Amino acid sequence: QVQLVESGGGLVQPGGFLKLSCAASTFLGSDYATSWYRQVPGQERELVASLLFSGRDAHYADFARGRFTMSRDKDEITVFLQMRSLKPEDTAVYYCNAWHYRDGERIDYWGQGTQVTVSS
């Protein structure tokens, strides 16, 4: 069982910057892939960015590419999402996700989410 705790959300003005953190309860290493998702009430949760297993290059949704940067710390316990040039449409609850395969089955773990509000 992996526990994930997000932090760093808040209220920011359009054009501003936020850095989200996700602390894992275990070493993630190359056994786990990690992602950030976001969700607006009444809409489906959407993928923001992913770092797959031991990969060093993150993959981004079109709306995030060029503005958001996903990374892991060198100890492979904390995952980050740096967001710049924020827009009101980035307002959502942001969730950290980690997943791995066990006996051929994908197992997902989720954080509780952190609210990001972009408004003047």
Image (tube, grey):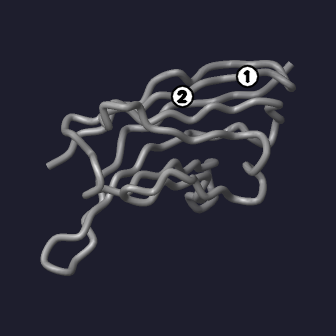
Question: How far across and how far down the image is residue 26, in percent?
Answer: 19, 38
Q: State the SS at label 2.
A: strand
Contact check, label 2 and label 1, Cβ < 8 Å: no
At label 1, the amino acid type is Phe
Q: Tell whether 52 sits left or right of 25.
A: right
At label 2, counting other C-alpha atoms closer than 10 Å, the crowd grade (few under 14, some 14-19, many 20 or more) is: many
Q: Give me the disc on residue 110.
A: none
Q: Residue at horizontal 23%, vertical 70%?
A: 101
Kindly report the distance in space between the C-alpha atoms of the residues bearing marks 2 and 1.
10 Å
At label 1, counting other C-alpha atoms closer than 10 Å, the crowd grade (few under 14, some 14-19, many 20 or more) is: some
The residue pinned by badge 2 equals: 20
Q: Quadrant of the C terminus?
A: top right
The residue pinned by badge 1 equals: 17
Choose between 87 and 75: the one closer to the eye. 75
At label 2, the amino acid type is Leu
- Residue 99 higher or lower than 106, as above or below: above
Question: How far across and how far down the image is residue 119, in percent?
Answer: 81, 24
Dividing the picture into quadrants, the one containing residue 62 is bottom right
Q: Residue at horizontal 32%, vertical 37%?
A: 76
